[in-house]
Amino acid sequence: MCLYPYDKMAMILVDRKPWVYIASEQQEKDIKLNCTCKDKAIANIDSTFKLGRFYLTNVTYRNSAFVNVKSNNHAIMLGPVMIYAEQSASENAYMAKNVSES
């Protein structure tokens, strides 16, 4: 059994370079619940991971449903992920657009 079945998986060719966007409905609901109010957490987009010939951009956010008892901070959760062949500003813009539309 998979904890997060990925409901959204899109493979896109942009200028003949592949992009893969992966997200679950639960991740998108959690981001909407935890990151859309003024006093809520911010979703972080990090595109620093290089996997061989590919790059990985992931979203993390703090989930208010879980609290670390030692630090009293909300748990950091993994959100949608995108894998692509060439790093440029358009990948980050695509990821931000998808996350903000969820």
Image (spheres, rainbow, N blue to C red):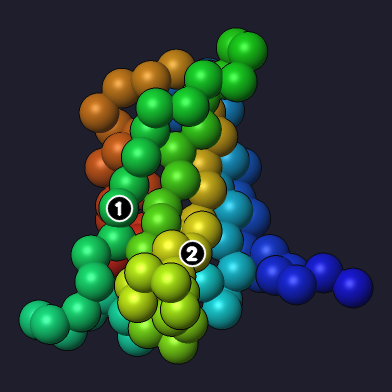
Which residue is farthest right? 1
**Which residue does the numbered mark 1 point to in the structure image?**
44
Q: Nearer the viewer, residue 67 or 5?
A: 67
**Which residue does the numbered mark 2 point to in the structure image?**
77
Q: Eyeballing the image, is 51 above or below 13?
A: above
Q: Residue at x 51, y 58 (%)?
A: 78
Q: Eyeballing the image, is 43 above or below 72?
A: above
Q: Secondary structure at mark 1?
A: strand
Q: Secondary structure at mark 2?
A: strand
Horizontal relation, residue 9 to residue 81: left or right:
right
The N terminus lies in which quarter of the figure?
A: bottom right
Q: Residue at x 44, y 38 (%)?
A: 57
| Image location (x, y in percent) of residue 31 | 38, 74
Horizontal relation, residue 53 to residue 60: left or right:
right
Q: Residue at x 60, y 69 (%)?
A: 24
Horizontal relation, residue 72 to residue 79: left or right:
left
